Amino acid sequence: MKFFKFLAPITAAFLLASCSSGDSGLNKADEDGNGSGLNRTKVDYSKGRAMNQRLGRGINMGNSWESTGTGANADCGWGNCLKDEDLQIVKAAGFNSVRIPVRWESDVDIANTIDPQRLAGVKEDIQLANSLGMPVIVNFHHHQDMNNAAANVENDPESFQAELQKFVTMWTQVAAALNSIPDDMIVFEIMNEPHDIKKSSTVNEIMTASYNAIRAVAPTKTIMFEGNGYSKFAEIKKLDLPKDDGNIIVSGHYYEPYGYTHQGTATMYPCGTGITGSDLSKIAKDFKAYVDSAIAYFPDVDGVHGVPMNLGEFGAIGRTGSKCATEAPSEASRAQWADYVIRAAEKYGISWHYWAYGKTSGFQAYDQDAGDWFPEMKKVFDAYTVKAFPAI
């Protein structure tokens, strides 16, 4: 593996100042959701749209690089190492791209410098995926220090600002080290699943400061934003997005209804929860509402589209590896749910990444022990991957 010298970090103070003084460059959020943010500047999103179409249909390489492991083999921290053959299997199945979640905060020193071995290992896997023709979304996953500080900002604003400075400093290192990857082969996703944060303005402060840090060292890369509530698309109207940069994508996650998709993961989601026809019918309605909101709040200059959208995670727990075992959804049931979600996303040209490929406590679509895809899931994927991703 190669090791990298980082560019001298741009000072966090400058980056944070630039985000607060650059509000005129933002389409501002509708904090209360009452429609006051509808008078938005139209943006040429053609670059973001082109990258979003390249992402097309993908899958998450979950529970690997976002584990609590450290160093060059951090992807093995939860016993689910990301192997070369895994990416080859994904490519052979017809997927266009992969999302590689990364827990960067596990590998920083007291000066907030990321372990170069971890960075080298992640870059090596990105380059392998690229060599197979697959672009990669790389993110900051499970960044608890930043999220917890944001959730507690009203009680401890100083700690929030300190964590935000650390966060943007880390993003500067990652973006600088990965900027050599071709523009059409990587997307920088700012922060996975912000949650339990009281005000959208706090989420926007994180997103804007990080966006500025990335843009400073990677001016031509596509950047992905996410909203609060575990990246719910319904939060799109509360985002601040640049009004002079269309090389962006908004990502959201979809696990509705949670009682079905997450059964057994918490006491509020008991095992044996089924799904109804009305639940399935609601999926298409949800996605229409999300797209309508994107067009209304972040219109494209073409008068047709809104900001490009990516479905970064969706999935339902199955019986293999889950706590519910035979009480969990059957393979046919969860495959049917996934089909409804994919169909709704593709109707609107929303790129998607299924959660997940390998061992993920029941969510996996590929059975690594058997060395094959779960047949019902593969049948659903095949129905889409044999066709070109819809033009958007």
Image (cartoon, rainbow, N blue to C red):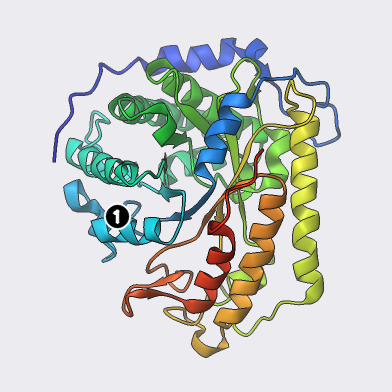
Residue 92 percent across, percent down from the top left = 38, 60
Q: Residue at x 44, y 55 (%)?
A: 60
Quadrant assignment for the N terminus: top left
Q: Residues within 10 Å of mark 1 (few under 14, many from 20)?
A: some
Q: Toward the viewer: 386 or 43? A: 386
Q: Quadrant of residue 40?
A: top right
Residue at the image point whose x is 41% and y is 67% from the top: 360
**Up-down relation of residue 38 to residue 62 (above or below):** above
As drawn, 387 above or below 274: above
User: 38 or 92, which is in the foreground?
Assistant: 92
Amino acid type of the residue tagged 1 in the rendering: Thr
Is residue 313 at all visible to an observer of this figure?
yes
Circle 1 is placed at which residue position? 68
370, 388: nearer the viewer? 388
Q: Is residue 162 above or below residue 338?
A: above
163 on left or right of 306 = left
Instruction: Where is residue 137? Give x, y as percent.
Output: 44, 42
Q: Is residue 381 left or right of residue 309?
A: left
Q: Identify the image quadrant of the C terminus.
A: top right
Mark 1 residue element: loop
User: In the rendered image, is residue 317 in sight?
Assistant: no
Residue 81 x, y percent position in the rendering: 26, 60
Percent of width and height locating residue 276: 77, 77
What residue is at 65 percent from the left and 70 percent from the top? 337
